[in-house]
Image: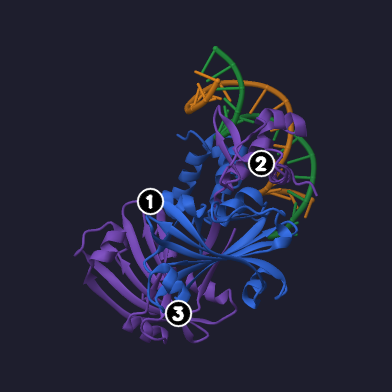
Chain colours: A blue, B purple, C green, D orange
DNA sequence: AAGTGGTCTAGACCACTAC
DNA sequence: TAGTGGTCTAGACCACTTA
């Protein structure tokens, strides 16, 4: 019948979809399922845990496992380094370091990083190109306190790539938004001021403090795809 | 304190971050780690599998487990029903069914659904409100072939909510983009034509065919947050 | 050909919590 | 307090893939 926990997961999912156990109902305990399917309980556990992680089912000790009433769909987004992102589309990648300078941290990025406005920071402006055309305009703030003393030449190795290979990160968050292109952004992305840009802001934190805040602006028409 | 495989995972992660095994390097085989930590191999397997799922490590049979050279960060987005999304912000939710009619499927949605343009479809326009103010403007196409014969009153129960509770879905995808508000969208969202909207398009498929295609437009300033 | 990860088993102990 | 899920163990077999 089944040759592994994933088959069992699929079978249980099918029975849930078929309303054999309607939303909110209890499904049999692991031991009973193990008996019914003729497998070990650990195998059932893996299958049901996978369903729980997918949001199909909710588990609580002693209370058992219930079919989720309003299933929360979970989408996963893979965030490769931008070079990989572009190359993955079969396009040639290039980047251009527009500006690099030390500057005091403005209020906005400071808030996102959890730092005080006015502390020294490294500010980088980078343009990412796909097939020679603007792919993303990046404004990045780096927290020098969390970086190694000797920095590379960001004109050669993009900050993006250097960071993931050098600085341990622990947590972070990602914010999607739509904003009108500023004059500078429009110029960099070869579009018109006010044009709708997909803006992705990312904050990254390490064990001992915030590392970097990035704001990526993508030109009109850019899309980010996730799978459910 | 010690909760088993997750502590082992954290410890291995720390050693990877500390460059004990630099990017691209092989980490010890499961059996050796099991010996070194004094646990069963299955426990090591769970820990390392978790690291692999997080993109920290790449596993291949016979080749062993290597520290990822360019770690692909994975972010997860929880997509609740819109009512929950709004209520989760502590705001009151309401929705207004603007239009509902049967119409032939235009080319765009048809392509996204994998259906032929011109087949009959159900078209719904809905406005979602938070605290009485526009939260999202929804344009939805439903594939009647995949729906139960008797439909509810979408003015009462939003299509969103009815679908997740009624029609089994299997897979789908999610696309983020930024687009200028059309005149209709601007009017619905109480903003100006051309204003940058965060657009989220979702396609949902069942076992035997595509179910629905939704286009959600959020007013300027709207943000979607994910955690890494 | 051999070593690796992927998975299963049968049994066990524990933490949690609804009853 | 009893039943549930969470986890661990020691051993085993297998598929895969690289050397």
Q: CA distance from mark 3 to mark 1?
A: 33 Å
Asked if the residues shown at circle 3 and circle 2 are in contact, with their CB atoms under 8 angstroms apart, the answer is: no
Residue under label 3: B219
**Crowd tier of the residue under label 1, counting other residues whose Cα lies within 10 Å: few below 14, some 14–19, many 20 or above:** some
Nearest the viewer among B95 and B49 is B49
At 26% from the left and 62% from the top, the residue drawn is B110
At 60% from the left and 51% from the top, the residue drawn is A162
Tell me which chain the residue with mark 2 is part of. B
Residue under label 1: A91
At 63% from the left and 35% from the top, the residue drawn is B25
Indicate the quadrant where residue B216 lies: bottom left
Picture coordinates of residue A40, whole percent (x, y): 60, 35
Tell me which chain the residue with mark 3 is part of. B
Residue under label 2: B47
Tell me the SS state at disc 1. Answer: loop
Nearest the viewer among A172 and B214 is A172
Picture coordinates of residue A138, whole percent (x, y): 52, 65
Indicate the quadrant where residue A189 lies: bottom left
The mark lying in front, picked from 3 and 2, is 3
Nearest the viewer among A212 and A64 is A212
Mark closer to the chain start, 3 or 2: 2
């Amino acid at each position: 019948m089944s040759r592994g926990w994933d088959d069992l997961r699929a079978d249980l999912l099918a029975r849930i979809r078929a309303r054999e156990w309607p939303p909110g109902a209890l499904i049999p305990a692991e031991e009973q399922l193990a008996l019914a399917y003729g497998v070990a309980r650990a195998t059932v556990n893996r299958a049901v845990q996978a369903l729980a992680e997918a949001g199909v089912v909710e588990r609580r000790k002693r209370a058992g496992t219930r079919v989720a009433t309003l299933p929360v769909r979970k989408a996963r987004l893979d965030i490769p380094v931008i070079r990989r992102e572009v190359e993955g589309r079969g396009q040639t990648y290039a980047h251009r370091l527009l500006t690099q300078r030390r500057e005091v941290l403005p209020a906005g990025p400071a808030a996102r990083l959890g730092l005080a406005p006015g502390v020294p920071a490294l500010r980088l402006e980078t343009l990412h190109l796909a097939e020679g055309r603007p792919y993303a305009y990046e404004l990045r703030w780096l927290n020098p306190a969390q970086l190694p003393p000797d920095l590379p030449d960001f004109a050669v190795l993009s900050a993006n790539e250097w960071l993931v290979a050098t600085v341990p990160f622990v947590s972070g968050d990602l914010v999607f938004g739509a904003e009108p292109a500023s004059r500078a952004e429009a110029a960099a992305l070869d579009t018109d001021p006010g044009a709708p840009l997909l803006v992705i802001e990312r904050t990254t934190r390490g064990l001992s403090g915030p590392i970097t805040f990035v704001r990526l602006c993508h030109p009109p028409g850019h899309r980010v795809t996730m799978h459910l």
